[in-house]
Amino acid sequence: MPGDAPSLKSYTLQNLGDVEQVARLPEEARREMQVVGSVLPFKANNYVVEELIDWERVPDDPIFALTFPQRGMLKPEHYRKMEEALGGGGEREVADSIRMELNPHPAGQMELNVPSLADGTRLYGMQHKYKETCLFFPSQSQTCHAYCSFCFRWPQFVGMDEMKFAMKEGEQLAAYVGEHPEITDVLFTGGDPMIMRARVFAKYVDALLESRPGSLRTIRIGTKALAYWPYKFLTDPDAGEMLDVFRQVSEAGIHLAFMAHFNHPRELGTQAVRDAIAAVRASGAQIRTQSPVLSHINDDAATWARMWAEQVSLGCIPYYMFVVRDTGAQHYFGVPLVRAYKIFTEAYTSLSGLARTVRGPSMSATPGKVAVLGTPVVGGRRAILLKFLQGRNPGWAGEPFLAKYDERAIWLDDLEPLEGGRFFFEEELEGIRAARTRKT
């Protein structure tokens, strides 16, 4: 990208024809993008298009699959329904009806995770699932520099306001944390918090630092900005100001954890991302990396080993390999749990100890964060061994349990207990759900 200060240009379905490389694709491929993009959100930018995608490999290029709509992302019946509706005047209604069939808020996000202040005020821009950590959705961060095609927060971007989590009031965030001394970590999420101007982000941070809840130890930022627009921290007009906000957090004695989403090694390959990583680290932030394992994008051990090794060499800490959540295009991107475990293990064992900080493969399911630990033979039967890393009941954390071996299962709900009956947590989870329903 020429020049010292690249300008951000965004592409949506409305100006997709401005992408020269897309204009050269077959008409059928462009039509498929329009159909799928009418249901699931699409947004890309000039950095992704010009620096990350290998257009000679399209449609098989992994970054193309990561950002541009693919026909298989819609089930055949949904694709046909949407294709027939285009141009007929009822596209929005058809698209919304399909979206409601795609489990837009998985893992009880809307029913179980939305907290309240002591006075009863519901905080729809927050989630509090695990005791120590609350999630905050600033209203100004409800978009991204580009959209990941697998994104489990896709409902934030499709114009259905009833599906959104968003909050403007940093004071309410500070008040809630102050009322809950068990909270040590606040995670800014979205969308992408790093879409915000530095002065806007600083207001939220200032509200926390000024109130200084005694239990607060860490501020986390969940972001894809390093991969999709590293110039945010290099040449954007407020790049220096944003880095100063990071320094302010560190100087206040609060740990700043920069939770960077990298889905493929190519996202680590430009000079811009390397310089941006160095700038963020120099501000006092610690960069941890995470990604789901994704069919069509990174579902082989060599890719993960290369990505983790490169992250370590750049001073980042590999943190999580996730499993694609049960929403949106899970049927297209999902990798069976048994295969995901094999990919994880092969990559993990090929690296030095510095990269073995990573955990996974992990599912962020309704009862909690559940990792696949192996496929042992128990009593003459092959099983899947799982363990809670986090739980709605904190006492579940660390608890192992066994499921019947199933090479097709891609999510916790696909599994059955090895000995029949119910998993140990299910009855208590029902009680948690019932109590929450009565409360709201």
Image (cartoon, rainbow, N blue to C red):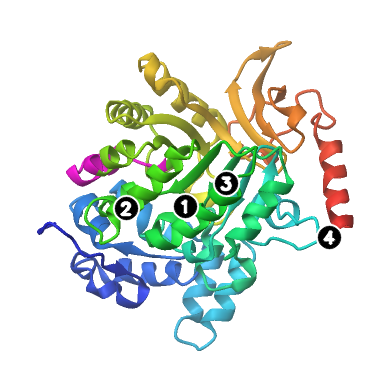
Image coordinates of residue 52 in percent, x first then y, are 24, 50
| Residue in the picture at 65% in, 22% down | 385
Q: Earlier in the sequence, mark 1 or mark 2?
A: 1
* Labelled pair 1, 2 in contact (Cβ < 8 Å): no
| Residue in the picture at 52% in, 60% down | 154
Image coordinates of residue 42 in percent, x first then y, are 40, 65
Q: Amino acid at mark 4?
A: Thr
Where does label 3 land, which residue? Answer: 325
Residue 389 seen from this side = yes
Where does label 2 land, which residue? Answer: 228
Cα separation between marks 3 and 1? 9 Å
Between disc 3 and disc 2, the foreground one is 2
Q: Dot 2: few (<14), some (14–19), or many (≥20) neighbours within 10 Å?
A: many
| Residue in the picture at 61% in, 62% down | 165
Cα separation between marks 1 and 2? 15 Å
* Labelled pair 4, 1 in contact (Cβ < 8 Å): no
**Foreground pick, 309 / 66:** 309
Number of the label disc, if any, that sits on residue 440: 4
Where does label 1 land, which residue? Answer: 150
The quarter of the displayed image where residue 384 is located: top right
**Foreground pick, 106 / 335:** 106
* Labelled pair 2, 4 in contact (Cβ < 8 Å): no
Cα separation between marks 3 and 2? 22 Å
Q: Is residue 218 above or below residue 112?
A: above
